[in-house]
Image: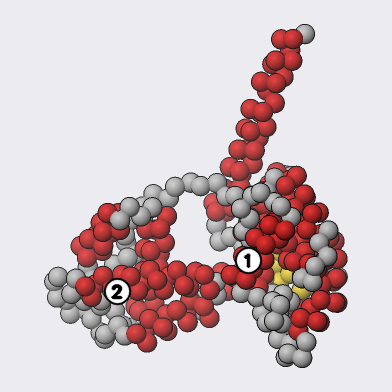
């Protein structure tokens, strides 16, 4: 590799650790995203070491060779896009800290993003799931029902729900003040059903779960009285589905997708949905229009042949 004079200092392990802390504390990224970005950056740095290439003075040919290796491993475009995004963030961070002077990833073309429709519940499925779960009487059922109702009624991300504090909730207005990605603040709302489930949980089970521990204000606690983790939330949602004999593979983000789909299907303006979800761009939100169109198409295909058959029989 060509030697350049634009290196200012060596990239160290402490720089890597500081970058991960920056993503979490300043960019407000979820633990899951921080972990993924950390793994992506570490893999690239290891590749540079194995190839005896400088971490500080990489050029486009080094990046092209790395991408060729990823494609050889048959990684999907979505995974490659995420790795490039992680490395863009990393080298931008290093540039701001005067550790490198150039970020070669900024001008790199991303692989084409495959358009994948989000997984969501149909109107009947979500009602059935919530109603079945409400029948549970086990120890943690009140907390679990409050989680499911709020996820669906507000469209919160998993990271936003587990970090939700009392100070962010206005019960009277049924509104939440959320700090989302990039510390962008937004207001979203919830309905009467979610409000009732929250009040039932916070006035009884939460007090028992907390016990004698210091109350840090987080609304949702695990069975040990500690703040929920994203992995813990994923387990709770999947466990609720199992206890309700729900056949779908259920994860927390499905409730967010279902929230948005319900709004779009009922005529909500796309920009309003964008604000409620906390999307930076309306183009991200527009995928729910595609979901709605898919739903319309399915209804048409299910019903139209039936109508034709009925007409012929007359």
Q: From where the camera sits, is residue 276 visible?
A: no
The structure residue drawn at horizontal position 70% and vertical position 15%, both measured from the top left corner, is: 309
Q: Where does residue 184 sit, x and y in percent of width and height?
A: 59, 70
Q: Is residue 144 left or right of residue 157?
A: right
Q: Is residue 177 above or below residue 112?
A: below
Foreground of the two, 142 or 106:
142
Instruction: Describe the element under mark 1 as helix, strand or loop.
Output: helix
Picture disc at residue 287: none
* Residue 76 relative to residue 230: left or right: left
Relative to residue 54, is residue 267 depicted above or below? above
Q: How is the image coloured?
A: secondary structure
- Where residue 116 appears, as percent x and y from the top left, is 51, 47
Is 218 drawn above or below residue 282 in the view shown? below
* Residue at figure coordinates x 42%, y 61% from the top left: 82
CA distance separating discs 2 and 1? 33 Å
Q: Nearer the viewer, residue 296 or 241?
A: 241
**Quadrant of the snapshot with the N terminus:** bottom left
Residue shown at the point (52%, 70%) measured from the top left: 32
Question: Of the numbered discs in the image, which one, if any, rests on residue 45?
Answer: 2
| Image-based side of 2 in relation to 20, left or right | left
| Residue 305 placement: quadrant | top right
Residue carrying label 1: 235
Place of residue 151 in the rendered image (x, y in percent of width and height, measured from the top left): 70, 62
Q: Nearer the viewer, residue 64 or 126?
A: 126
């Amino acid at each position: 590799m060509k030697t350049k004079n634009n290196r200012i200092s060596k990239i160290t392990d402490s720089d890597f650790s500081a970058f991960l802390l920056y993503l979490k504390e300043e960019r407000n990224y979820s633990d899951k995203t921080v972990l993924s970005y950390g793994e992506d950056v570490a893999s690239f740095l290891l590749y540079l070491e194995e190839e005896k290439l400088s971490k500080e003075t990489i050029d486009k040919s080094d990046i092209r060779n790395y991408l060729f290796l990823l494609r050889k491993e048959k990684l999907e475009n979505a995974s490659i896009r995420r790795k490039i995004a992680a490395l863009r963030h990393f080298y931008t961070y290093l540039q701001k800290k005067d550790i490198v002077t150039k970020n070669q990833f900024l001008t790199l073309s991303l692989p084409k993003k495959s358009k994948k429709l989000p997984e969501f519940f149909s109107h009947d499925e979500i009602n059935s799931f919530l109603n079945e779960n409400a029948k549970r009487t086990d120890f943690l059922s009140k907390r679990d029902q409050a989680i499911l109702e709020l996820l669906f009624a507000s469209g919160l991300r998993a990271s936003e729900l587990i970090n939700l504090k009392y100070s962010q909730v206005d019960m009277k207005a049924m509104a939440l003040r959320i700090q989302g990605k990039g510390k962008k603040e937004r207001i979203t709302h919830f309905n009467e059903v979610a409000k009732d489930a929250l009040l039932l949980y916070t006035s009884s089970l939460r007090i028992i779960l907390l016990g004698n521990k210091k109350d840090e204000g987080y609304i949702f606690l695990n069975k040990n009285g500690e703040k929920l983790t994203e992995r813990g939330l994923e387990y709770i949602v999947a466990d609720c589905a199992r206890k309700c004999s729900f056949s779908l593979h259920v994860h927390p983000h499905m409730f967010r997708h279902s929230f948005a789909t319900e709004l779009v299907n009922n005529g909500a303006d796309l920009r309003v949905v964008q604000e409620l979800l906390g999307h930076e761009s309306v183009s991200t939100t527009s995928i729910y229009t595609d979901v709605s169109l898919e739903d319309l198409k399915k209804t048409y295909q299910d019903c139209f042949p039936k109508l034709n058959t009925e007409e012929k029989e007359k």
